């Protein structure tokens, strides 16, 4: 399969003026997002997120790491929850995603009054027996945040990669969602799993926009 080059696919300079924080960037999806969005002129920063087994300690470490990396003008948060899932499993990865999202919202999106976007990249379909539960949890988080934080001009979207989806494909979608055109989407799951979806699951996208 040919590699998808987001800077060649999308308009040059599409993300100029956009500040983006990528959490869990050690994974293939996070690294792909960093490369693609940097190539489209976004200002990017990375933040490694704790997967400490103790929930209270994990939350404290994530808050400290995010605050240290947070650009005052950050407009987009991308979380490679797939990378977190590989290290911490279902509960740990979902808790880390929520802790990071809340910290960025309180310290950036809401504090600045400018709103922002949250992109949650779920584990691939073949990542483990709890990967479908992780997708469901992130979809629920995106739906809930799109309602609860709508008054703060914050949108939230979850992405469910299929087992054959490479990092560059997911990165191209993330770059599009980070652009002005991506503001249309909120509270939905963009499902890239195709026939790997659970039987009876609706086609992508689903949710509200």
Image (spheres, rainbow, N blue to C red):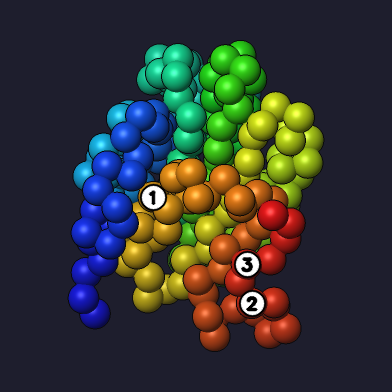
Q: Toward the viewer: 70 or 132? A: 70
Q: Quadrant of the N terminus?
A: bottom left
Marks 1 and 2 sit apart, C-alpha to C-alpha, by 21 Å
Q: Which mark is residue 142?
A: none
Q: Nearer the viewer, mark 1 or mark 2?
A: 1
Query: Disc 1 or 2, which lies upstream in sequence?
Result: 1
For image coordinates 32% across by 34% down, the residue present is 16
Image location of residue 64, percent across then percent down: 47, 16
Marks 1 and 3 sit apart, C-alpha to C-alpha, by 17 Å
Residue designated by label 2: 203
Residue designated by label 1: 175
For image coordinates 35% across by 29% down, the residue present is 17
Horizontally, is 209 left or right of 53 in the view? right
Image location of residue 123, percent across then percent down: 49, 59
Marks 2 and 3 sit apart, C-alpha to C-alpha, by 6 Å
Q: Toward the viewer: 38 or 142? A: 38
Rendered position, 120 above or below 113: below
For image coordinates 34% across by 64% down, the residue present is 169
Horizontally, is 150 left or right of 43 in the view? right
Residue designated by label 3: 205
Horizontally, is 174 left or right of 141 in the view? left
Q: Toward the viewer: 156 or 90? A: 156
Q: Toward the viewer: 8 or 50? A: 8
């Amino acid at each position: 399969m040919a590699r998808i080059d987001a800077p060649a696919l999308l308009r040059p300079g599409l993300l100029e003026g956009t500040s983006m924080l990528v959490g869990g960037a050690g994974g293939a999806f996070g690294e792909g997002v960093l490369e693609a969005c940097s190539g489209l002129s976004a200002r990017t920063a990375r933040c490694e997120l704790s997967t400490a087994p103790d929930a209270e300690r994990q939350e404290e470490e994530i808050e400290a790491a995010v605050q240290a990396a947070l650009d005052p003008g950050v407009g987009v948060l991308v979380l490679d929850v797939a990378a977190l899932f590989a290290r911490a499993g279902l509960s740990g990865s979902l808790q880390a995603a929520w802790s990071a999202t809340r910290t960025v919202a309180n310290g950036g999106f809401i504090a600045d009054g400018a709103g922002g976007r949250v992109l949650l990249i779920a584990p691939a379909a073949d990542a483990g027996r709890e990967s479908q539960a992780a997708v469901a949890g992130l979809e629920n988080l995106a739906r809930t945040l799109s309602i609860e934080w709508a008054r703060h001009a914050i949108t939230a979207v979850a992405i469910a990669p299929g087992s054959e989806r490479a990092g560059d494909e997911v990165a191209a979608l993330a770059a599009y969602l980070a652009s002005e055109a991506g503001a249309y989407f909120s509270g939905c799951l963009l499902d890239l799993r195709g026939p790997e979806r659970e039987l009876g699951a609706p086609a992508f996208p689903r949710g509200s926009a």
